Image: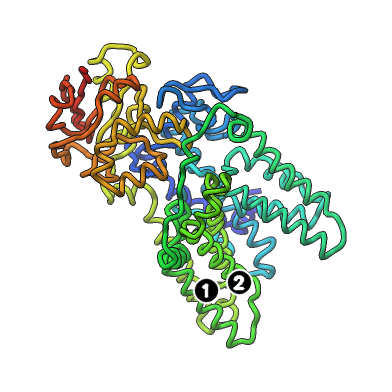
Amino acid sequence: MWWKRFNNFMKAKWIWIGCLVILAYLSPYLIFGEATHIRVHDNMDSNIVWYKVLAESGHIFTLQDIQLPYAVNGLPRSALPSAFDAVVWLYVLFEPMAAYTISETVMRFAAFFGMYLLLTRFILKEETSPWIKVGVPLAFALLPYWPSGALSIAGIPLALYGFLMIRKYRKQAPRHVWLLLFLIPFFSNFILSFVFFLAIMGIWWFVDRIRFGNWNWAFFTAIAGMTSIYLLKNYLLITSMFFSSDFTSHRAELELGENTFQRSYELGWENFLYGHTHDEAHQAYIIVPFMLLALLTAILKNRQPKLLMILFLANLVLSFWYAFWYWEGWRLIKDHISIVNEFNFARIHFLDPPIWYIIFALALLIMWKHLKFGKYLAMLAVVGQCMFLFVLTEDIKYREVGTPSFEEFYSEDLFADIQEYIGEDPSSYRVVSIGMHPTIAQFNGFYTLDTYNNSFSLAYKHAFREIISGELEKNPHLKNYFDNWGGRLYMYVAEHGENYMYTKDKNEPIEQLDINTDALQALGGEYILSAMEIGNAESLSLDLEEVFTDKESPWEIYLYRANG
């Protein structure tokens, strides 16, 4: 009995080693809890709070796109995650940091096993070293994924494995494959990546029909089934976009496309080598050189690595498609076709990371087989990539950068003191923040006029602009940023630019703040939570009520009240 168990363990020892490395990678979340340092951008400044607020709202399920009062005097429910998003329910069942940790764990293990199954069943068609078939999936699992994406990128190999199994075995495909394909939508984002992935699967199915002359209905059913789940999951977003005549989103004014041809060309190469902040594959220093070495080796050995070349060219095309989506030459089309302007077709580049790691595996296989010292080079490449990625775990990376930890960022005790000082029900007044992300106040139960969200009323954006127009006029970059994108409805300060992190050790006073206090009060604004002193507060009809600090918090909050 024990010998059989030991024998089974030894057969899967490389898998177990990979799992242990992933657990070590995840250990800071378990060791430090809320003291963990995690990503701020598009994470603590937004998505975490969206999940938390929605979980506490009482409006997770709703048939109509109602207005949630916690932000912008009524944020559309459709601007927040779907009721069928599994991560939402993690925030219902657990405290935010615990929910975040569980989501990270699901993401890493899905990435690992998905890439392992894809490589061993369909890509590496011959038996090869575990250094490649386990090492490459491990590296893929350690990527610094955008946390709130969950399986939007990390789950693509798993989904591709499922579709390939059904394409090959049709009705005889194992049941667990169907189950995987129907579970992935609940942990991933359709708009971000899977709309493109499923479109590619649909094209593949159609090409198969032409090539082989028969209908693979199992493959079609899998594609249609997964797409249908996504559409049902996003019912509120779809109805608000296409069937609501009384709501105009701020996205109607998007103008994403001002780059010159030269800048677009440069951006294409930048993305090809270094990726995007939301889909970093960290390919430049190990994967790309080894890919080029493998291609050279194949040429010298008279080999034709067709799949490697196809994937290499695919990522090159995706990178330049992404870059030229922001080229000014698109404006003629974007200005006349709303869907082209409002929907970001450049996001197909989120498919880059899985492609890069398939390329990595194929390149290592060529070197392993055809170079004298190829085995050692392949092992060195895998170890080097894994070590490089391991030290990019959130706590290590952001602790070194110096951003606040989870508990420091939200500083619940400090904001509880402010709420107690005001002494009113938070729903009875509205606040804005200066020098801080407004989601900090939202996390702590304040109702804010400012926010960061994907969609809100265009009319409200225009009304909010009246408050900060004086500061926007002093900074052309901020003016363009707000007017042509505007997803961040922030109390911008011209001299601060896009810096929203003014901690108590870096909070020099604002000498001249040009805001319209009357416009602030017209929207219901009563208090300003400022991370620094406002030098001309008196001329703005702002009364300094109190200054709040806490030894455990990085913030020093100046509480001003509009007295106009």
Residue at figure coordinates x 55%, y 72% from the top left: 364
Residue 59 percent across, percent down from the top left: 53, 21
Nearest the eye: 411 or 328: 328
Instruction: Farthest residue to the right: give it.
Output: 214
Residue 315 as seen in the image, left or right of residue 205: left
Dot 1 amino acid type:
Met
Residue at figure coordinates x 56%, y 56% from the top left: 351
Residue at figure coordinates x 50%, y 54% from the top left: 331
Dot 2 amino acid type:
Leu
Image height check: is 246 above or below 499? above
Residue at figure coordinates x 22%, y 30% from the top left: 530
Residue 127 percent across, percent down from the top left: 66, 69
Q: Which residue is mark 1?
A: 291
Question: How far separated are the C-alphas under marks 2 and 1?
Answer: 8 Å
Residue 415 percent across, percent down from the top left: 27, 24
Q: Residues within 10 Å of mark 2 (few under 14, many from 20)?
A: many
Q: Which mark is residue 531?
A: none
Residue 101 as seen in the image, left or right of residue 426: right
Instruction: Report if residue 16 is visible in the image.
Output: no
Q: How many marks overall?
A: 2
Looking at marks 2 and 1 on the same chain, the residue that comes earlier in the sequence is marked by: 1
Residue 526 percent across, percent down from the top left: 27, 19
**Tag 1 secondary structure:** helix
**Tag 2 secondary structure:** helix
Residue 255 as seen in the image, left or right of residue 351: left
Nearest the eye: 409 or 499: 499
Q: Quadrant of residue 495?
A: top left
Instruction: Farthest residue to the top: give it.
Output: 424
Q: Which residue is mark 2?
A: 308
Nearest the eye: 324 or 319: 324
Q: Are marks 2 and 1 in contact (CB under 8 Å)?
A: yes
